[in-house]
Amino acid sequence: MTADAVVLTEMEADEDRVISPAELFRKWEHGQWQLTELPIASDAADWAAMRPYARRELESMIEGFVLGEAAVSNTLSPIADAAPSLDAHQYLCTQIADEARHTRFFATYLQEMKTSAPTHEEVIADARASAGEAVSTIFDEELKARTDHVRFHPEDTRAWYEAVTYYHLMAEGVLAMSVLGAMLSMVRQLRGSLPVLNTGLRNVIRDESRHMAFGMYAAREGVRTGHGSAVLNTMMEAIPQVTMALVAPERKLPGSSIPPLRAALGKQHAHRYAGARRTLLRRMELIGLQDSTGDAGRAWDTAMVAAMAEYERRHGDAHPAGETPAG
């Protein structure tokens, strides 16, 4: 099953209809899971038995989520505080709890898998130190700047829609969901290994589907009420950052020097990038920006070429996905 297909099968939200914040709150109440019930340490033997290049790839993706989830749990409160309705505010408060739980899940998982067993604070610090430049730009710079503006100017409705678009639709809806799908697909290919990580990822994806559904609701409202340019401009500004974070040119893909593995990596990554592109354009259609999908698609393609070129510049070797049709 492909990464984007995995995501679609795990998602609860029906994107073709508007899901109100009140309904999302009810879905949150019925979709609870407890981190303390996951026997994370029981995955350790499977983790140790993985091939080194596969383990490093998975570890890198988990580190990215440690950084991302920690960042978003620290930056969501201004969006909640400035929400345009009580229902939206109350739903966003549930999302803050989700993000904190995700941070603890991924940090605890790395704690248990690494023999050094650092604290959560050390895990987050290590993830920040090893994060790619584009990931740091998105979560430590752009997201913070946009939500800080809302914090200090809660009356600025346009800024609120810009922050929600960047946060929910781009950072979470395109980037995070693409990586989550790739992680879950990778774990499933291990055929029974890492069962706790498999369960945790499924739980996180269900949570993220609610967050994305709120972003879709808010963006539709923004377009409907005259803030369509704010939504569109934010998406266009985020495209180069999201594509660069997906490619992560500073990190050479492990195993890419082995011809059979290189071909497999190329196919997987090309399909993943194409899936993220389709997701972006589909969301634009659903929120009422269908007239701008052509421009967005061209901007995505241009940004992806630039990210691939940066990978080749850094490593003296073409990115495997650039040699493989997305199919």
Image: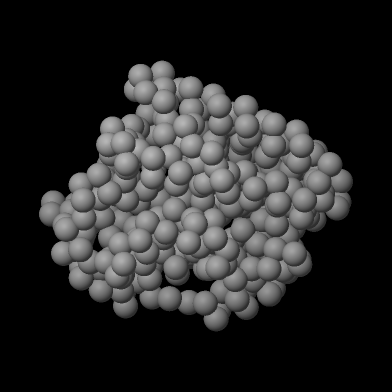
On the image, the x and y values in percent for residue 185 come to: 42, 59
Residue 309, compared with residue 202, is above or below; it is above
Above/below status of 240 relative to 74: above
**Which residue is more in the foreground, 7 or 176?**
7
Task: In this rendered view, identify the residue nearer to me: 135 or 277.
Answer: 277
The number of numbered discs placed on residues in the rendered structure image is 0
| Front position in the image: 196 or 319 | 319
The answer to whether residue 79 shows anywhere in this view is: yes
Q: Is residue 243 above or below residue 268?
A: above
Residue shown at 82%/51% (left/top)?
288
Who's the residue at 16% across and 57% down the image? 48
Q: Residue at x 76, y 67 (%)?
A: 17
The residue at the point 51 percent across, 51 percent down is 178
Furthest residue in direction front, as rendered: 260
Q: Position of residue 313 (x, y in %)?
A: 41, 18
Q: Residue furthest left?
A: 115
Choose between 297 and 23: the one closer to the eye.
Answer: 297
Kindly give the residue lying farthest to the bottom in the view shown.
30
Pinpoint residue 129: horizontal percent, then vertical percent.
Answer: 31, 36
Q: Is residue 319 above or below residue 44?
A: above
| Residue 139 in sight from this viewpoint | no
On the image, the x and y values in percent for residue 152 come to 63, 41
Q: Which picture quadrant has residue 303?
A: top right
The image quarter in which residue 85 lies:
bottom right
Please say which color scheme the image uses: one colour
User: Left or right: where does residue 324 sit relative to residue 20?
Assistant: left
